[in-house]
């Protein structure tokens, strides 16, 4: 039986699902930049890449799964538990927002640095 109603848990489920969709491209870009940045295959790089892939899976697929469960099954929770879910969802978004914003600013810095390098190369060639 599928039953969904609009309550705190359902709203949190939709919010977490949307947040995970917003975090998806940031996680992909972070993995790509991490792999492109270094030419060596040291143990540190491999561990860092594996950790980023785990974070990518948790942000993307875990967030969608949790959001779907809360949306479709949140009506079963009593009001106190719904408030607890609301606080938990707000905490997850607040904790991950710092990381996602940091990833985005790092991406912009790298983009600007690559643009400056390409301008210098054009000047050197002429």
Image (spheres, rainbow, N blue to C red):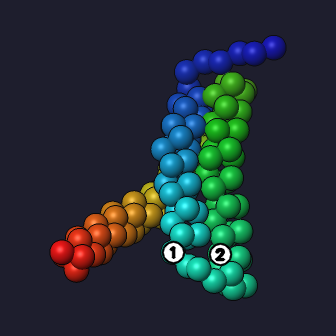
Q: Position of residue 123 (x, y in %)?
A: 19, 75
Left/right placement of residue 122 relative to residue 78 reads: left
Given residues 65 and 88, the one toward you in this image is 65
Vertical placement of residue 91 versus 89, above or below: below
Q: Which mark is residue 119?
A: none
Vertical placement of residue 3 versus 32, above or below: above
Q: Is residue 55 visible?
A: yes
SS for dot 2: helix
Left/right placement of residue 19 relative to residue 53 reads: left
Instruction: Estimate the spatial distance between the alpha carbons at disc 2 and disc 1, rounded to whole Å.
Output: 12 Å
Check disc 2 and report the residue beneath it.
Answer: 48
- Asked if disc 2 and disc 1 are in contact, CB closer than 8 Å, the reply is no
SS for dot 1: helix
Q: Position of residue 31 (x, y in %)?
A: 58, 63
Q: Position of residue 51 (x, y in %)?
A: 68, 69
User: Image point 71% across, 68% down: which residue?
Assistant: 50
Check disc 1 and report the residue beneath it.
Answer: 37
Left/right placement of residue 41 relative to residue 31 reads: right
Q: Quadrant of residue 92?
A: bottom right
Q: Position of residue 80 (x, y in %)?
A: 62, 40
For the N terminus, the image quarter is: top right
Vertical placement of residue 68 versus 112, above or below: above
Given residues 117 and 48, the one toward you in this image is 117
Rate crowding at label 2 as few (under 14), some (14 to 19) or many (20 or more) other CA atoms within 10 Å.
some
Given residues 117 and 95, the one toward you in this image is 117
Given residues 58 and 111, the one toward you in this image is 111
């Amino acid at each position: 039986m599928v039953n969904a109603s609009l309550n705190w848990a359902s709203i949190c489920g939709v919010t977490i699902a949307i947040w995970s969709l917003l975090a998806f491209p940031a996680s992909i870009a972070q993995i790509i930049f991490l792999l492109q940045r270094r030419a060596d295959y040291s143990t540190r790089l491999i561990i860092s890449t594996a950790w980023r892939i785990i974070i990518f899976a948790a942000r993307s697929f875990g967030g969608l799964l949790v959001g779907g469960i809360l949306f479709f099954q949140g009506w079963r929770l009593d009001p106190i538990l719904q408030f607890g879910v609301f606080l938990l969802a707000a905490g997850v978004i607040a904790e991950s927002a710092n990381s996602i914003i940091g990833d985005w600013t790092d991406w912009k810095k790298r983009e600007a640095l690559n643009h400056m390098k390409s301008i210098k190369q054009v000047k050197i060639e002429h």
